[in-house]
Image (cartoon, rainbow, N blue to C red):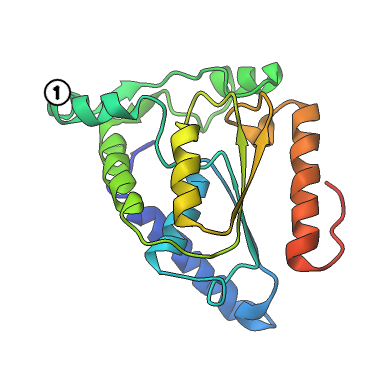
Amino acid sequence: EQATIRDFQEYDAVFSGLMDQITENMDDGPASKLVAFGQSTGGAILINYLLKRGFNVETCPFNDVILLAPLVRPVGWRKGVIFHPVVSLFMKQMKRKHGDSSSDEEFLDFVRSQDPLQSLYLSVQWVGALIRWMRFIEAQPATDVNLFVVQGDNDGTVDWRHNMKVLEAKFTARELFILEDGRHHLVNESRDKRADMYQRITERLKQTLNTPVPAA
């Protein structure tokens, strides 16, 4: 079924399986310079992977972790928590709304009318899985794993102010870059915003990898 999941730990199972394959087939083993990037729910998957296993800076399989507009809580999450138990009794899915998640009008048109992978509906089951996952993540102990977060201050998809506080508490070595007027789809933002973001990421990787990094 499209756009649904029973539990967010299904994401974790798939990602951890991928990580097992990667580390098994790397010439230098887990000590190689792996860097993880996660956008939105991809960021949530990385957050879950790191906190669930209690990694610290010494045991983490990544030299750096970079999250772009990561999901912890979405905008309007309070309504979801209140109404989900009732709505789930009568509905299996809700119509999705594609808001102004980028300053790139061409990208927005693609998402709204051309992208074959965009579901028109969101499963109520997925919302329930998200609510349970939010509680799980906010109950996990903190870690000193290296973390770099890029967050737009005009993001209308995630509750970013709350999310940044959670990540600051959970990842004590967290570094934050606020992209001015950036919206949610940071990798599909306008060209000038992407250039600013990639410059900061490049500077970050030069430090954490201690090696030359070509500009994006």
* Quarter of the rendering occupied by the N terminus: top left
Q: Position of residue 158 (x, y in %)?
A: 47, 31
- Quick check: can you spot residue 14? no
Q: Is residue 216 left or right of residue 22?
A: right
Q: Is residue 43 left or right of residue 198?
A: left
Q: Position of residue 80 (x, y in %)?
A: 27, 28
Q: Which residue is found at the position 28% from the left and 47% from the top?
A: 135
User: Taking 94 as reference, is 5 above or below it?
Assistant: below
Q: Is residue 44 left or right of residue 204?
A: left
Q: Nearer the viewer, residue 113 or 101?
A: 101
Q: Nearer the viewer, residue 50 or 97?
A: 50
User: Taking 143 as reference, is 71 above or below it?
Assistant: above
Q: Position of residue 169 (x, y in %)?
A: 45, 52
Which image quarter: residue 4?
Answer: top left
Q: Nearer the viewer, residue 14 or 82?
A: 82
Residue type beneath disc 1: Phe
User: Taking 152 as reference, is 11 above or below it?
Assistant: below
Q: Nearer the viewer, residue 32 or 209?
A: 209
- Quick check: can you spot residue 129? yes
Q: Position of residue 59 (x, y in %)?
A: 53, 76
Badge 1: few (under 14), some or many (20 or more) residues near its Cα, within 10 Å? Answer: few
User: Taking 49 as reference, is 84 above or below it?
Assistant: above
The secondary element bearing badge 1 is classed as helix
Q: Which residue is mark 1?
A: 90
Q: Which residue is found at the position 80% from the left and 36% from the top?
A: 195
